[in-house]
Structure formats: C-alpha cells, structure tokens
C-alpha cells in the first residue's frame, strides 16, 4: 500500500510539473519540465532523506559524540528487530524528532537539541521508539517523499509567481503557445493547497500506529504519553526554526500547528487523543519488551 501511495504522489508531482512547464513556456517548457520531473522522481526515492536532513541542518552523530543516546537507540533497535538507524542531531531548541529513509536498512532518526535537553531518559527512549515504529511500519519512504514533493510545490508556486510578474516581454507567437495568464496565477494559489493535501495523504492513523509500536518496543506507554505532552507544550513556547511546514508531518508533534480552521488541515491527530490511547494501553497492561 505504501508503494502505491508513493507512486501516486510522484505521479501527482509529475503532472503538476508538466502543467507548470506548459503554462510558462509552451512546448519547450513542457520538455524541460519532463526532464525535471524525471530527475525529481528519481531523487525523491533515492535522496529525499538527505534533502530533508539538510533542510533541518542535521548533523550525524558518531558513537563518541553521544554515548548514552547511542546506547538507547541501539538497545531499542535490537528490541524492535531493526538495524540501528543513523542518528542525527538538529541544532534547534524546540523539542522534536523524526525518522527518515527509504527502508529499514537505510534509515535515520533525527532529534533536536531541545528534545535531548528537556526530556528525561525514559521520555527520550519513548520518542526514539515511536520513530523506530515508523521505520518498522515502513512509513518513512512515503513520509519523506511527501516532504520533498511539498517543498517542490512551494518552489513551483514561487516560480510561477515571478514568471507571471516578469513575463510581460513575451512575443505574440510565445503568447499563443502558452496557457492563459490566469493559469499562472492559479498555480500560485493551488501550489500551497496541493502541498497541504499531499501532507494529509499521509494518514493520521500512521501516528497512532507508530505510538502503539513505540509503546510495544519500550513496554512503557506512559513515557510516550508524557513526552507528547511536554513536546506539545514546549514547542509552542519555543517555536521550531529549522525545517519548514513542508516537513511538519515528519515530526512526532507538528511544530507549526495552529488553532481554529488550521486544525482541519493538521498533519497529526490531536495530542490529547494520542495520550488518551496510550493511557488506555497502560491501564490494560502491556508486556515489557526491554
């Protein structure tokens, strides 16, 4: 199912790129857009994880950089039956974390400096276990590809806007070949909406499933519930400065969430609902896995 969703998302990007190319430069633009689409589809599969990590200015950690954190990740990976993912540190005071990579053998977990500083050991382990849950459930490819595509859509919107503003010198022949100027303005309006819809294509149920998987790995649902509460409160006090809304759905808690109608387009289920499920799991009793 993840492969089908990934294919659908990449197909959507291809169609949008071709449409924008046609709108901007007629048949010539269509050919250029086709080349770009092929390159981006290839890149989204093989290199989107690196792109996202660079967006967050994440630095890879070695075993000597964070011995305790490395020990936590190694122990949890063993319990989950996964290869140990690469570990990255994001220079951001807002507590958060995400996982990326096209498969469990090429996976990475990134945590912010704020997460390591503000959460206790059990809560950090619970957050890492949640991210390992995404890796185990093979969510990371589609989630990272969606981040790449959402970023591309925002870039396209800006490209169309500037082309529309500066394209007054086109010849009559070029104008006949291009789409109506309103198509460019429509692209500016639709690109952010399309980016949001792509993020919403990543089902909110994935967060519930990753929460459950994380609780199974640690055997401590309450630690994850406590971590989620802290992250939501602290991230509102200390906003995230790395990354962008295009990568919000990767994070364990949306660092750019708002209230009112914005919640309708939230990439995550309400934290209160996630905490309630985790507390119910603790009441039922859960086998300790580590």
Image (cartoon, rainbow, N blue to C red):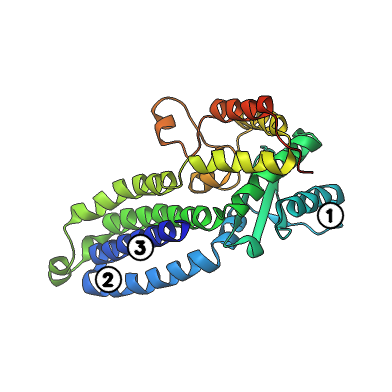
User: Label 2: few (<14), some or many (≥20) within 10 Å?
Assistant: some
Image quadrant in which you'd find residue 170: bottom left
Task: Report the quarter where the N terminus lies.
Answer: bottom left
Dot placed on the residue nearer the N-terminal end, 1 or 2: 2
Crowding around mark 1 (Cα neighbors within 10 Å: few <14, some 14 to 19, many 20+) is few
Q: Which mark is residue 30?
A: 2
Residue 92 visible in this rendered orientation of the protein = no
Where is residue 129 shown, x and y percent of the image?
69, 45
Residue at the image point whose x is 74% and y is 53% from the top: 77
Considering only order in the chain, which callout, 2 or 3, is on the residue closer to the N terminus?
3
Total number of numbered discs in the rendering: 3
| Quadrant into which the C terminus falls | top right
Q: Which residue is mark 3?
A: 11
Q: Secondary structure at mark 1?
A: loop
Disc number for residue 220: none
Q: Residue at x 71, y 44 (%)?
A: 217
- Number of the front mark, 3 or 2: 3
- Give the structural element (helix, strand or loop) at label 3: helix
Residue tagged by mark 1?
A: 65
Let me know if residue 219 appears in the view.
yes
Position in image of residue 43 (x %, y %): 49, 68
In the image, 101 versus 81, the foreground residue is 81
What's the CA distance linking mark 3 and mark 1?
41 Å
| Distance (Cα) linking label 3 and label 2 | 15 Å
In the rendered image, residue 83, in percent from the top left (x then y), is placed at 72, 60
Q: Give the residue at x 74% y 35%.
A: 123
| Disc on the earlier residue, 3 or 1 | 3
Name the one closer to the observer, 23 or 49.
49
Given contact means CB atoms under 8 Å apart, are the residues at marks 3 and 2 in contact? no
Residue 222 x %, y %: 70, 29
Query: Which residue is located at x 56 percent, y 55 percent?
Result: 140
Question: SS class of the residue under badge 2?
Answer: helix
């Amino acid at each position: 199912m993840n492969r089908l969703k990934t294919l659908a998302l990449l197909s959507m990007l291809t169609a949008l790129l071709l449409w924008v190319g046609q709108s901007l430069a007629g048949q010539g633009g269509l050919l250029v857009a086709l080349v770009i689409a092929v390159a981006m589809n290839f890149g989204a599969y093989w290199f989107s994880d690196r792109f996202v990590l660079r967006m967050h200015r994440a630095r890879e950690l070695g075993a000597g950089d964070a011995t305790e954190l490395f020990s936590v990740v190694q122990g949890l990976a063993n319990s989950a039956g996964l290869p140990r993912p690469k570990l990255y540190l994001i220079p951001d005071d807002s507590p958060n974390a995400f996982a990326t990579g096209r498969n469990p053998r090429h996976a990475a977990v990134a945590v912010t400096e704020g997460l390591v500083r503000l959460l206790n050991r059990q809560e950090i382990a619970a957050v890492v276990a949640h991210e390992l849950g995404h890796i185990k459930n093979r969510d990371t490819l589609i989630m990272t590809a969606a981040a790449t595509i959402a970023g591309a859509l925002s870039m396209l919107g800006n490209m169309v806007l500037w082309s529309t503003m500066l394209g007054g010198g086109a010849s009559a022949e070029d104008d006949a070949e291009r789409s109506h100027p309103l198509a460019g303005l429509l692209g500016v309006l639709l690109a952010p909406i399309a980016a949001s819809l792509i993020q919403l294509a990543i089902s909110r149920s994935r967060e519930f499933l990753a929460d459950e998987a994380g609780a199974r790995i640690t055997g401590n649902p309450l630690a994850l519930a406590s971590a989620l509460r802290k992250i939501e409160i602290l991230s509102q006090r200390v906003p995230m400065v790395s990354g962008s809304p295009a990568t919000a759905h990767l994070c364990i808690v949306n660092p750019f969430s708002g209230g009112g109608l914005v919640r309708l387009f939230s990439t995550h289920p309400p934290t209160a609902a996630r905490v309630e499920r985790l507390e119910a799991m603790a009441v039922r009793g859960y086998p300790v896995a580590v």
